[in-house]
Image (spheres, rainbow, N blue to C red):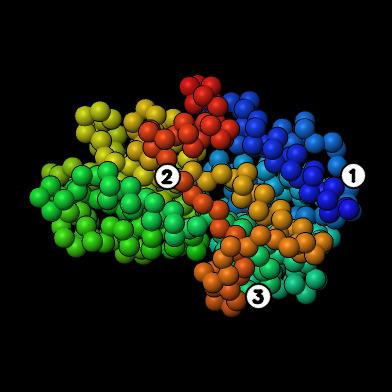
Amino acid sequence: MKKKLLGALLSVAMVASLLVGCGEKAADTAAPAADSSESTEAAAPAAESNGKRVAVAMPTQSSERWINDGNNMKSQLEALGYEVDLQYAEDDVQAQVSQIENMIAAGADCLVIASIDSSALVNVEAQAKAAGIPIIAYDRLLMDTDAVSYYATFDNKGVGTAIGKYIVDNSGATPDSPKTIELFMGSPDDNNAHMLYAGLMEQIQPLLDDGSLVCLSGQLDFDSNCTLRWDQQTAMKRCEDLLTGYYADKDLDIVATAYDGLAYGCMAALEGAGYAVGTKWPLITGQDAELMATKHIISGKQTMSIAKDTRKLAEKCVTMVQAVLEGAEPEINDTTTYNNNVIVVPSFLCTPEPVDKDNYKEILVDSGYYTEEQLAE
Ligand code: BGC
């Protein structure tokens, strides 16, 4: 009975968030979009406390998606009566360790963690386990630990596959008309970055092999093209160096980045090197379909991104919290892929969706993720 009531409340919150989730936010880049907190508060009756506290550790507020993730988790959990302790560590690994220690000391009943460095939390995860506190990995797999119960994420290799397919289908690269390409991958301490790279390479390797794609820097292996902490400035600097070192006499045709923030860094480097949208401008990929990236897609500055509906991810993660705290059955759709070097973590993979100027309305506006007004501002 209690479960039914909780389920009903969750459904109300979900529907409300899907309908009006991100409507009223301002359009600047830092503004969280697709944030269901306001709508949930408005639609769901203030939930009676169920006496349980869920601590949510997020990596950084410097990227829009994690703000949305945090807000969605908070509002959906609160609608079910959980008390929520949401904290961001601003990409400081030690700060995240301390935050989690404090969460344990403050009596968390469950930890939800989106890690900064996925192997750096082993000790604090062991502390949680010893204290009987279950852990759910959020979006990023927690490595080298047996203390994690479930993992809610997107199909991370699928993100790379989608980016790779997009390049294969849209770059016009053929052996007779080769295109130059450089890769800007994610953080080496994030398992997602490696999976994305694997998916991408699987798609583009045949074109590299037959000469349709040419990487003049030769920096095709992950170690040479990854970007610690997914940092925009690092990507900008590396792009500047590549343009100076390898593209003085040739155009760079494709900038394959793994995240919108990296794409912004590369765009700044390209502009600095004299490239301009409309005259000489590469195909540029990204991930997260941030508000700014989507505006860039509309204006032609960024070619595509990968939409990840953080409302749906939070929804799946909440069912995992309920599972570990109330014995409910969470929905799982992958029990083989996510081996963290100690155990295979039962996972739910949400579906990432490639977006470009042709389908952004359908994927991002019709779903209520952004409004036309936000995109027009
Ligand atoms: C997430 C991406 C995000 C990246 C940078 C990854 O772990 O899966 O969606 O773009 O981190 O924040």
Tell me whether the residue at label 3 lies in contact with that at label 2, contact meaning CB atoms closer than 8 angstroms: no
Q: Residue 354's mark? A: 2
Residue at 27 percent across and 43 percent down: it is 170
Instruction: Determine the CA span between mark 2 and mark 1.
Output: 39 Å
SS at badge 3: loop
Instruction: Determine the CA span between mark 3 and mark 2.
Output: 33 Å
Q: Give left or right: position of 300 versus 214.
A: right
Q: Residues within 10 Å of mark 2 (few under 14, many from 20)?
A: many
Which circle's residue, 1 or 3, is located before the other in the chain? 1
x, y percentage for residue 204? 28, 57
Disc 1 residue: CB within 8 Å of ligand 1: no
Q: Residue 245's mark? A: none
Q: Which kind of residue does numbered mark 1 sit on? A: Glu
The reply to whether residue 121 is visible in this rendering is no
Instruction: Determine the CA span between mark 1 and mark 3.
Output: 33 Å
Tell me whether the residue at label 2 lies in contact with that at label 1, contact meaning CB atoms closer than 8 angstroms: no
Q: Which kind of residue does numbered mark 2 sit on? A: Pro
x, y percentage for residue 209? 19, 63
SS at badge 1: loop
Q: Which residue bears the numbered disc 3? A: 146
Instruction: Say above or below: 375 vs 127.
Output: above
Q: Give left or right: position of 185 versus 51.
A: left
Q: Report the mark closest to the observer, 3 or 2.
A: 2
Q: Which kind of residue does numbered mark 3 sit on? A: Asp
Q: Give left or right: position of 284 versus 319.
A: left
Disc 3 residue: CB within 8 Å of ligand 1: no
Q: Residues within 10 Å of mark 3 (few under 14, many from 20)?
A: some
Q: Report the mark closest to the observer, 1 or 3.
A: 1
SS at badge 2: strand
Nearer to me, 66 or 160 = 160
Q: Which residue bears the numbered disc 1? A: 48
Which circle's residue, 3 or 2, is located before the other in the chain? 3
